[in-house]
Amino acid sequence: MTTTGQAPEPGSARWLADQAAAEPGVLAKAGQVLAAGRRSNDTCLIARRFVESAWNLRQRAPDYQRAADLLDRAGKDRLAEIFRAIDTAGAELAAASQAWQARWAACPAGQEQLAARFAAGLIELSGAPVLGVDGAWYQPAACRAGAGEQRHPAVLVSAMATRELVTGFTGQAALTAWLRTRDRAAARAPLAEPAVAPLPRLVLEERVLAWLIRHPYWLPPGFGDDLRAADCRHEIDAALRTAGTSDGRQGYPGVVRELRRRTLRAPDWAGDLIGWPDGRWVQQYLWRLAATRVPLAAARDAFQALIAIPAAIPAAAPAPAPAPAPARPRPAPARQARPATAHDQYAAALYDPSYPRPGSAGTRMRITRPGPRP
């Protein structure tokens, strides 16, 4: 359908119309998905993800509406209707993306102290960060209690908006062994805890989730999802709560289904964390959590420890009250920004655009070289 010599930009209306003409089977398959699901929100999202995966359109913002107009003018109204159907998911995706970005609007507690230790040269990093089973980055490090003190092995764990230094290893071999269990390429097996004290926050959160997957009724009052320090754990926690609300008897299969629905709404830029487009990584993490047995006493201790940990430094002013939900999803109003802190200034010097999260402090969390930049 292209009449000019210049190739259209992938995802543009003209490009999509050309692709529909060149590969009608992709849209035909999307049409079958839509028909089977009666064009529900979920099936529109499934069809959209299928098209974008088949045509490599991740993070391209495809112009489906204008492409449908072009197909209409070319007499391909059935293909145009498929584009229009999957375009209806755009508003819901925009709202979900903004919710992900706003998830950690405040600076989590403890980040200032960690930044100060980096600035003082008490933490040295080595090796490249590696994505773990929970979607966080794991990087070997060495830390000292003070200038001139002995160095001890440690691991810097960087989630989308938090960093945690795991210390207390008996030696480098113990650190390396634990890191192997955190790798996505590790065998599907129960999650292993590091033999350190105190236990890191990520282990406490995993204890809680592993317990709740097996005991979905055991939810203490006031225990909020703001205590999740990584996006994958946040999504699993939210899926578990939603599945339990709809039918507490569903258990693990219900969490799997609900997590799959949430994965459909995850922003494209979070694809490396969840395993775009089908959420294979976060589902693998859920499986390993479900396979991890946690004693009641350990789960109770983890609950109590997390409740006692301050979740975040409050924003400068409260966020505006949310408006009543409209008939169709719309992006929520942006939260008010909090004042810049020393942590922000330090983290900005460590910015790495290869770890994306638009508009969030998490874009500045991944450290790829030892020590602060000059």
Image: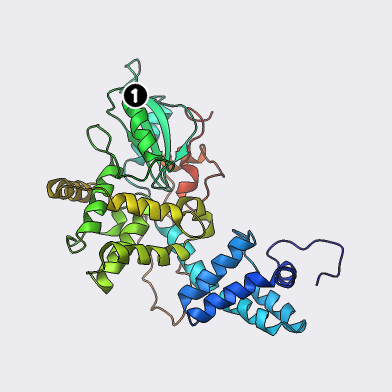
Q: Name the spot of residue 70 as percent of width and height, x first.
A: 74, 78
Whole-percent x, y for residue 171 in the image? 31, 22
Identify the residue shown where x is 41% and y is 40%: 183
Q: Name the residue under label 1.
A: 173
- Residue 319, how many percent across, how many down? 37, 64
| Residue that lies at the very extreme toward the top in this rendered image | 148
Give the amino acid type for the residue marked by disc 1 in the picture.
Answer: Ala
- Residue at figure coordinates x 29%, y 39% from the top left: 192
> How does the figure colour the protein chain or chains?
rainbow
Q: In which quarter of the image is residue 53?
A: bottom right
What residue is at 56 percent from the left and 44 percent from the top? 354
Residue 194 point in image, percent of width and height: 28, 34
Q: Is mark 1 on a helix, strand or loop?
A: helix
Occupied quadrant, residue 236? bottom left
Observer able to see residue 320: yes
329 above or below 138?
below
